[in-house]
Image: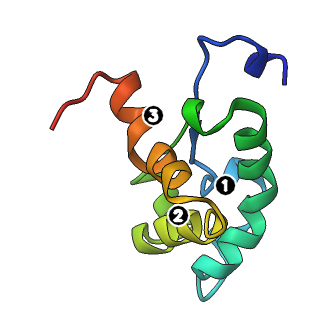
Amino acid sequence: MELASHRNVVCKLGGLGMAVFGFDAHVQDPPPTSERLAELWRPFIETCIEAFGVDRCMFESNFPVDKQSCDYTACWNAFKRITSGASAVEKSSLFHDTAARVYSLTA
C-alpha cells in the first residue's frame, strides 16, 4: 500500500507461477487448471489492482520461469478469469494500455 501511494510506481501482475510463492503448483500432477490458478492468485492480483488502480497495473508473462507451475495458456486464462467482472476499459488497461503507456509502445 505504501508503494501504491507513490504515483510514479506501476505494478506488473504475474510471476505467481514461481515455486517461491508457495502455491505448490509445480508439484501438482496434473498441473493446475486456469480455474485453480485464478482461485489461488485472485487475492493477490485483486489487492494490487485495488491499491494501484488499473491505470498503474499490467498483466505480464513470466515465461519460461512460470512454466514450472502452469502452461502459458492456463496462465493467461487465469488472468482473464480473475478480471471477468471488469469493464472493457479496465481490461484494456490491464492487458494492454498500461504497458503500452509505461513502455512507450506504439502499434
Is residue 78 depicted above or below 59 in this figure? below
| Mark 2, residue position | 68
Of the residues shown, which amino acid type is indicated by label 2?
Gln
The answer to whether marks 2 and 3 mark residues whose Cβ atoms lie closer than 8 Å is: no
Alpha carbon distance from label 3 to label 1: 27 Å
Seen in the image, is 74 located left or right of residue 106?
right
Q: Residues within 10 Å of mark 3 (few under 14, many from 20)?
A: many
- Along the line of sight, the residue nearer the viewer: 32 or 26: 32
Looking at the rendering, which quadrant does residue 54 occupy? top right
Is residue 82 depicted above or below 98 in this figure? below
The answer to whether marks 3 and 1 mark residues whose Cβ atoms lie closer than 8 Å is: no
x, y percent for residue 30: 59, 88
| Mark 1, residue position | 19
Is residue 61 depicted above or below 74 in this figure? above
Name the residue: 71% across, 11% down. Answer: 6
| Mark 3, residue position | 98
Alpha carbon distance from label 2 to label 3: 27 Å
Of the residues shown, which amino acid type is indicated by label 1?
Ala
The answer to whether marks 1 and 2 mark residues whose Cβ atoms lie closer than 8 Å is: yes
x, y percent for residue 89: 50, 50
Of the residues shown, which amino acid type is indicated by label 3?
Thr
Alpha carbon distance from label 1 to label 2: 8 Å
Label 3, secondary structure: give it.
Answer: helix
Label 2, secondary structure: give it.
Answer: helix
Name the residue: 67% across, 55% down. Answer: 19
Seen in the image, is 98 located left or right of residue 80?
left
Q: Quadrant of the C terminus?
A: top left
Seen in the image, is 70 located left or right of residue 63?
right
Q: Give the mark, 3 or 1, whose residue is nearer the N terminus.
A: 1
Q: Give the mark, 1 or 2, whose residue is nearer the N terminus.
A: 1
* Viewer-nearest of discs 3 and 1: 3
